[in-house]
Image (cartoon, helix red, strand yellow):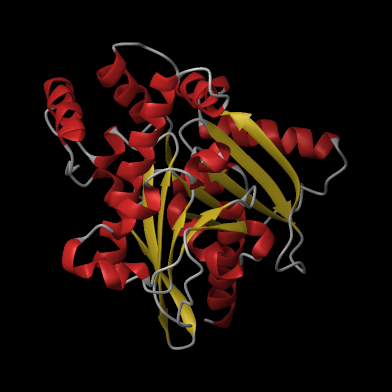
Amino acid sequence: MRLLADIGGTNARFALQAEADSRGFSDVEVLACSDYPTLDAALAAYLAGARARGMAVDGLRHAAIAIATPVEGDVVAMTNHHWRFSTAALRTAFGLDTLLVVNDFAALAMALPHLGDAGRERVGPACAAPPDRPLGLVGPGTGLGVSALVPHAGRWVVLPGEGGHASFAPTTKQEIRILEALLEDHGHVSAERLLSGAGLEAIHRVLCGERLAAAQISARAIDGTSGACRESVDVFCAVLGCVAGNVALTLGATGGMYIGGGIVPRLGRLFHASAFRARFEAKGRLQPWLARVPTWVVTEPYPALRGAAAMLADHVAAHAGA
């Protein structure tokens, strides 16, 4: 078996994959990050539970962790959670031959070419994307992830990055008002300050003076019980469209732009009815160019685990060949 993990700022998702199974995985479990002091503790808890469920975890040799933070060097420190660890020490502690640690949105991007119709949902017109062109990805959740895939020599190459921390640029008077309020709190206002769970809360607080959790805002907008919450969600979706359009232009993502993360799939019809697609295309002279780029919401439950599995398989094969 191989161990797979997708670690976000709120939840840690674990799964096992048989080495002979290049596509599927099993024994998926989602643990709350706040319940464990360290990643080591969460990983040990998952493996203990898997062992109790009869899974053959004692012979684990290879593992991949997709995590919501930049991954550079041996020490990994999360941006939106307090977990911090050494890759080498974690590999030794769990007796692994291979421990591949990658950015979570890099792993999610690697899953994009393998999504079937059941794993994605089109937003906007049915554009015919040319094959083998770059794919873009943005995703609001605990933070805002940004990544891309570029075709090269018959395979996909992932471009990990931290585009969620690029500066937010307002395009309406309402968004200028939000920016001015957030400048007072943060100094630098990134796209993530609006496009995340905390960002939705901040939008609602500035527009309505009401402090609600992101889940409450979304729920009241969806069931129609609060016009103020609906307005906040509409602003959120419009800003996301603007940022997604920026990413598509920057990367030349004519193969399609994908929306991942945990927030948008829950909005359902509300997202489709929002200004997302109009704002995605609203780039002046480049509007006709963006009008030809399809946009999709990722609906597969655990896409980053699938991408991490693909990256681990390539890594193990490359080292075996070497």
Residue 309 spot, x, y in % from top left:
61, 61
Residue at left offset 32%, top offset 67%: 290
Residue 107 spot, x, y in % from top left:
50, 58
> Residue at the bottom extreme?
153
Tell me if residue 129 comes above or below residue 274 in the rendering: below
Residue toward you, 142 or 100: 142
Q: Is residue 91 visible?
A: yes
Left or right, 116 with respect to 264, comes to: right
- Dividing the picture into quarters, in which one does residue 22 lie? bottom right
Residue toward you, 53 or 186: 186
Q: How many marks?
A: 0
Residue toward you, 62 or 69: 69
Residue toward you, 22 or 221: 221
Residue 315 spot, x, y in % from top left:
53, 69
Residue at left offset 76%, top offset 47%: 57
Tell me if residue 60 comes above or below residue 234 in the rendering: below
Left or right, 110 with respect to 190, comes to: right
- Dividing the picture into quarters, in which one does residue 285 lie? bottom left
